[in-house]
Amino acid sequence: MDFLKSAVASAIAKGSSLPFSLGDRVDGNDTLWTLHNATKRDDGSNCSVFTFDINANKSRLPLAKNAMRKCRTLRHPGVLKVLDTIETESHIYIVTERVTPLSWNVKRKSISEETAKWGIYTVASTLKFINEDASSVHGAVRVPSVYTSESGEWKLGGFDILSSMNDDEAIIYTYGSLVPDSARYTPPEINKGGWEAIKRNPLAAVDSFGLGILIFEVFNGSFAGADQVGKTTNVPPSMHQSYRRLCAANPKIRISAANFVDQGKKIGGFFETPLIRLTDDVESLGLKNDSERDEFLNQLSQVSEDFPEEFFKMKVLPELLKSVEFGGGGPKVLTAVVKIGTKLTDDEYASRITPVLVRLFANPDRALRVSLLDNLPLMIDRFSQKLVTDKIFPQMTSGFTDVAPVVREQTVKAVLTVIGKLSDRVINGELLRFLARTANDEQPGIRTNTTICLGKIAKNLSQNTRTKVLIAAFSRSVRDPFVHARNAGLLAFAATIDSYSEDDCASKVLPALCPSLLDREKLVRDQANKTLDLFLQRVRQHGSTLADSVLPPPSDTSAANNTNAARIGTSNDTSWAGWAISSFTNKLTAANGEIQPTSNGNALTAAELARPSSVPQPAHAPVAETLHYTPSSLKVAHPLVRASSETAAKVTTTTTTIDDMVEEDYDDAWGADAWDQDDGQAEDKDDEDAFFDTPASPAPAPAPAPAAVPYDDGGEPDFAGWLAAQSKAKTKKPLLSKNKTSSASADLPIRSTGTSKTPATTRASKPAKIIDTKPKEAEGEEDGWGDAW
């Protein structure tokens, strides 16, 4: 019992000292070796370990030692790559690259014809090297001696009886029959005369026969025995002739592996396939000139989907990456890299391709940058958001300002690809600033694409900036001189209709759309009508949900009813000017009583008395003092104020002018020029004065009032006295001074009237004060009146 414990402890100690960790056992190979998957302890990389148990196969120990020795010395791309060999008292270990037996795929018949030709070509080329360059004989060429690497390449192993023909004591002569299942694969001359027959026949005859059996087995899945040798079942027709010569019974007429390769490489031969040509050229890709590189890439594009993906991942891809980064491969090589990268897992992509692509985005080559942007949709899903935001997008931004239009255009298009990987801070800050720049680009196509881009990324913009940015950008686009830019702006408005509130639709979007209804291009007019209908439908739908009025309901008192009637007119009148007309037709007798003086004892200003009933009262009573006008205020004179100006002149005791009333009552000057234009014709002036000199309505009987009332409520205004006073004032200043700068805004002298009808010239205690409100025109200042019209 103690002996068993010590033996187990010794095995564990020996196993722990090995530079690898054994994994699963790989079965299905008829050899004297046991194959295991393993990993190296130093770096954790994958490897395979061929294990030979000395105690279980002592008779075949010379074969295992011969295989270990030949693996150390034989180096060729088609030979199994050996990493290490270890020999202990109980085992022999051969550590190689990670491989799987070819027999797995052969038995499943999962090998395509192109891949089979490529693999046979590799094995035949390796045998050519062994027979001619190494002057050796493999002696055991068959499916169990061939393995598939991680790159999909076929690797020749099984060097148990590999011998140099220069050695008279070669192991093949003595131990050749100890190879497992040797009787089934042995050539006819060996079956008759033993392994010594190799000396009497061509050196390559034995391996040529084995190559023929390998071809049959690959295309048919298995090899039963000698009766199947030379049969062409499932073998490609182009290979029949050469295949039969490999399997000839007479060793002297068999063609060697070298001759077999030469026949296949002839023009139109069975080895003239894109995959084989690609394999031959990939190793020297970095040394090729432009024409040779283009030819190689054309061959790469011809490779069909049934070719081994592993080969492109492990062999072609690294060479392409070196070529595009250091060898000047250019956009075509990059396109091939991206195409192969689609077949990689995320971990493989991150370790092999991503670092190179990040460095390429910093490359100043414009053609390479454009190719990167074109292929970005194929690679963006493999990038993390942090990688795009921190490394890739900052390199992309230089494309927005590049002098080459094609780079700017491709950069704008690439925004749609990377937008999902950018942070909100970058989108609403840096990105929008660059898009604002391209929206004003000199190239109309770039402006159009920027509009389309903004329409598609609208949902990615923040709520605070979305409406403002989109309305400004699209409104500018619909005024673009390029027809397709205008059309794109209309389409973008329609596509982003949900981004705007109903108020924005009515006040900002619809005014921007209306000019396009009369566009010179029918394409734009048609789209403008469609877009306008969408926004009108939304605005109308929202308007139908609003209340009929936001005004408070009227009170029940008759006084309130009379006041409201005087201000808003007849409620039954539905015409567009109903409120204005009704305000003139209401009875003035509803305003009973006297106008009370203000707190300082002065009467109310003329502006209050002259105010039409339909105009809302000001928040505070106007101060009875002279106002100083700016030139702009002189241009404003509302018709309603003008209509009551003469009444104000008769009833006011202060020095408030007509222009004061204009300043106090209205800020909106939208019709002033229509009323106050002076064309220099006398008859127009007379008509205008006659229009405003409407007979006054009879005043109601007032209650007793103090003597300081502002007007005589018992009689008509003294127009005669007023005219007499004005005739004297004409020598000093005209009544209504009109000039090029203002329109009918000179002040009228306002006098106080008493209870008697004494003429104004004997009744006035003071001469009327004339206030000159004419602005001082700057020297050389041009008359800009009416420029807006």
Image: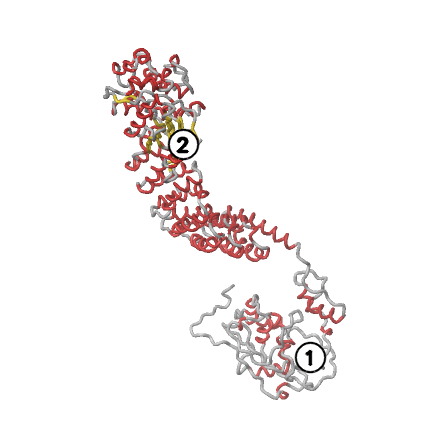
Please state which of the two labelled residues, at mark 1 or mark 2, is closer to the viewer. 2
Q: Is residue 609 above or below residue 472?
A: below
Q: Earlier in the sequence, mark 1 or mark 2?
A: 2
The furthest residue to the front: 2
> Which disc is residue 703 wearing?
none
Write down the quadrant of residue 637 in the picture. Answer: bottom right
Task: Say which residue appears at 33% left-offset and 31% top-offset.
Answer: 85
The furthest residue to the top: 192
User: Is residue 363 among the parts visible in the rendering?
Assistant: yes
Label 1 SS: loop
Residue 104: where, in percent of width, then height? 43, 25
Front-lying residue, 731 or 739: 739
Q: What's the amino acid at mark 1?
A: Ile
Label 2 SS: helix
Q: Is residue 381 above or below residue 558?
A: above
| Quarter of the image that includes the N terminus | top left
Residue 551: where, in percent of width, then height? 68, 64
Q: Is residue 552 left or right of residue 469?
A: right
Label 2 Cα crowd, 10 Å radius (few <14 / some 14-19 / many 20+): few
Disc 1 target residue: 595
Q: What's the amino acid at mark 2?
A: Ala
Label 1 Cα crowd, 10 Å radius (few <14 / some 14-19 / many 20+): some
Q: CA distance from mark 1 to mark 2?
A: 128 Å
User: Is residue 448 among the parts visible in the rendering?
Assistant: no
Write down the quadrant of residue 685 in the picture. Answer: bottom right
Disc 2 target residue: 7
